[in-house]
Image (cartoon, rainbow, N blue to C red):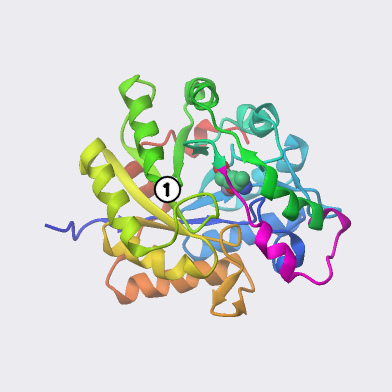
Amino acid sequence: MSDTTRKVIISCAVTGATHVPTMSEHLPITPAQIRDEAIQAAEAGAAIIHLHARDPNDGRPTPNPDIFKQFVPAIAEATDAVINITTGGSTRMTLEERLAYPLRAAPEMCSLNMGSMNFSIHPLASKVSSWRYEWEKGYVEGMEDMIFRNTFKDIKHILLELGGKGTRFEFECYDLGHLYNLAHFVDQGLIKPPFFIQSVFGILGGMGADPENMTVMRATADRLFGRENYHFSVLGAGRHQMPLVTMSAILGGNVRVGLEDSVYIAKGVKAESNAQQVRKIRRILEELSFEIASPDEARAMLGLKGRDKVTP
Ligand code: KMH
Ligand code: ZN
């Protein structure tokens, strides 16, 4: 029996560390651009804002807490959205770098990647004829030989250090095995329900964007955790974004959009902003008679500590 009272949480991932500036002139780079994009995404209906930082001079992903400090407090001041800081950073960052700002800020939510993997967009490099910044070509091509490190010890460290500060997690699961890794930590007593499972489709190195994979992930999560113990969410990379997040809602899940995951708003059409993607999925969901969760409704659903417990 579908729960007709449930509301759908919209997350928005504003800039990420995978796309490079050449891939879209709308990708926010500076603290002011990230701030404004996040606020507008929240105003458009995103209850959770997922944030990375970039060097304002050339858009290179950075873990520098001083850069995060230039936009996270302003976003927290201007909106009541849940702020979700990445612990994934980029595949070129050490775990210590990735955790520098999250440990300082102890936000309500952080991403947590549930397994080591290949994670790459290197095939896109050959499609670019001229790069905006000198670092981009090597960064994108270099992904071919990078491992996104998330060992069991790394994950345990994040759960203990950040979890110990009351931060809860967007568990990013790129493959079926990542659900079993999550179950391992649940069995260890290191994770308490409700779990927020962000199922990631279409990243080269993770599972593909076939709709059939979503039903497998959903059924496996039901079997491992029981539907009452977790909230399902989906992000789809690139062109897969809107169809897959729509399918997630139909399967009883939540949705994540944002330029971190896709620079498009439609086939071959670049999104002009994160808010444009938020408005599009909101329109689709409301046309399907879904209600959109407010930030505080998302907090209640996910058991978050409250924005008054955060000093960004
Ligand atoms: N940029 C990816 C390597 C996260 O935010 O935790 C990792 C990522 C997921 O973006
Ligand atoms: Zn991210």
Quadrant housing the N terminus: bottom left
Q: Magenta stretch containing residue 122, yes or no?
A: yes
Q: Quadrant of residue 276?
A: bottom right
Q: Nearer the viewer, residue 27 or 137?
A: 137
- The region drawn magenta spans 118-136
The answer to whether 28 is drawn above or below residue 171 in the figure is below
Give percent across and percent down for residue 141. Answer: 74, 54
- The residue type indicated by label 1 comes to Gln
Quadrant housing the C terminus: top right
Q: Magenta stretch containing residue 123, yes or no?
A: yes
The answer to whether 108 is drawn above or below residue 134 in the figure is above
Residue 33 appears in the figure: yes
Residue drawn at (71%, 60%), measured in percent from left and top?
Answer: 28
Residue drawn at (61%, 73%), measured in percent from left and top?
Answer: 271
Q: Is mark 1 within 8 Å of ligand 1?
A: no
Left/right placement of residue 10 relative to residue 40 reads left
Give percent across and percent down for residue 116. Answer: 53, 36
Give percent across and percent down for residue 78. Answer: 60, 53
Residue drawn at (44%, 40%), measured in percent from left and top?
Answer: 171
* Label 1 secondary element: strand
Residue 8 appears in the figure: no
Give percent across and percent down for residue 246. Answer: 36, 67
The answer to whether 55 is drawn above or below residue 181 in the figure is below
Residue where numbered disc 1 is placed: 198
Q: Nearer the viewer, residue 245 or 211?
A: 211
Left/right placement of residue 41 relative to residue 228 reads right
Left/right placement of residue 246 relative to residue 72 reads left
